[in-house]
């Protein structure tokens, strides 16, 4: 599969200087676009994570029976963009207080989630949650429901979902933030 933005094969086996993190913030189409635009991001793809089915696909994930969330895997160069800057985009691009939904997209597959590949990133993500929760409370908004854990399994979604909003510029994108800024 060729990435339509980076013009190279979708490949997450990059050099050792590249880190990765997985974000779930509602419909993966719009979330992926938020990250592929950032300088320092080396690769994005949409897929499924956080579930217990050995071979998830879009139809199964949409039923809710797999436990997977629609997610975006982001490979980034930490010398050019920090994990905190990625977390800022994550927190601000959706409403992490909505539980198992984002806007009109309802179901466990649309939950807010951060899946890290190492414990140190999980701690940074937990700390950022506390910071953003304080900002939300100061704005009169509710509690964050975001799942944060170290997660090893990521399943690449079908090709037609990859860079969907680049291929379909007028496509549906149901993500929206709280209008509350993340304090870096």
Image (cartoon, rainbow, N blue to C red):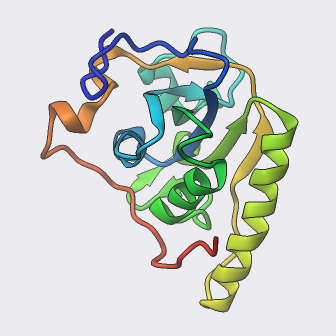
User: Which of 96/19 is in front?
Assistant: 19
Q: Quadrant of the C terminus?
A: bottom right
Q: Residue at x 78, y 42 (%)?
A: 121
Q: Residue at x 66, y 16 (%)?
A: 53
Q: Quadrant of the N terminus?
A: top left
User: Which of 4/147 is in front?
Assistant: 4
Give the x, y percent position of residue 46: 44, 28
Give the x, y percent position of residue 162: 33, 25
Tell me: residue 9, above or below residue 152: above
Total number of numbered discs in the rendering: 0
Give the x, y percent position of residue 63: 50, 30
Q: Residue at x 74, y 21 (%)?
A: 152
Give the x, y percent position of residue 75: 54, 30
- The answer to which quarter of the image holds residue 128 is bottom right
Tell me: residue 9, above or below residue 153: above
Q: Residue at x 46, y 37 (%)?
A: 41
Task: Name the side, left or right, on which 30 lies relative to 145.
Answer: left
Tell me: residue 140, above or below residue 12: below
Residue placed furthest toward the front:
79
Task: Name the side, left or right, on which 145 lies relative to 6.
Answer: right
């Amino acid at each position: 599969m060729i990435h339509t933005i980076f013009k190279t094969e979708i490949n997450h086996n990059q050099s050792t200087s590249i880190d990765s993190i997985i974000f779930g913030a509602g419909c993966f189409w719009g979330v992926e676009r938020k990250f592929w635009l950032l300088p320092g991001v080396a690769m994005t793809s949409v897929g499924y994570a956080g579930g217990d089915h050995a071979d998830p696909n879009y139809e199964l994930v949409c039923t809710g029976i797999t436990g997977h969330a629609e997610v975006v895997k982001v490979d980034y160069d930490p010398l050019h963009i920090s994990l905190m800057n990625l977390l800022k985009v994550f927190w601000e691009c959706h409403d992490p207080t909505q539980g198992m939904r984002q806007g009109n997209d309802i179901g466990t597959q649309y939950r807010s989630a951060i899946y890290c590949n190492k414990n140190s990133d999980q701690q940074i993500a937990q700390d950022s949650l506390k910071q953003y929760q304080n900002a939300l409370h100061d704005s009169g908004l509710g509690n964050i429901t975001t799942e944060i854990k170290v997660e090893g399994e990521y399943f690449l979604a079908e090709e037609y979902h990859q860079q969907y909003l680049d291929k379909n510029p007028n496509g549906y994108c149901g993500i929206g933030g709280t209008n509350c800024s993340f304090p870096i």
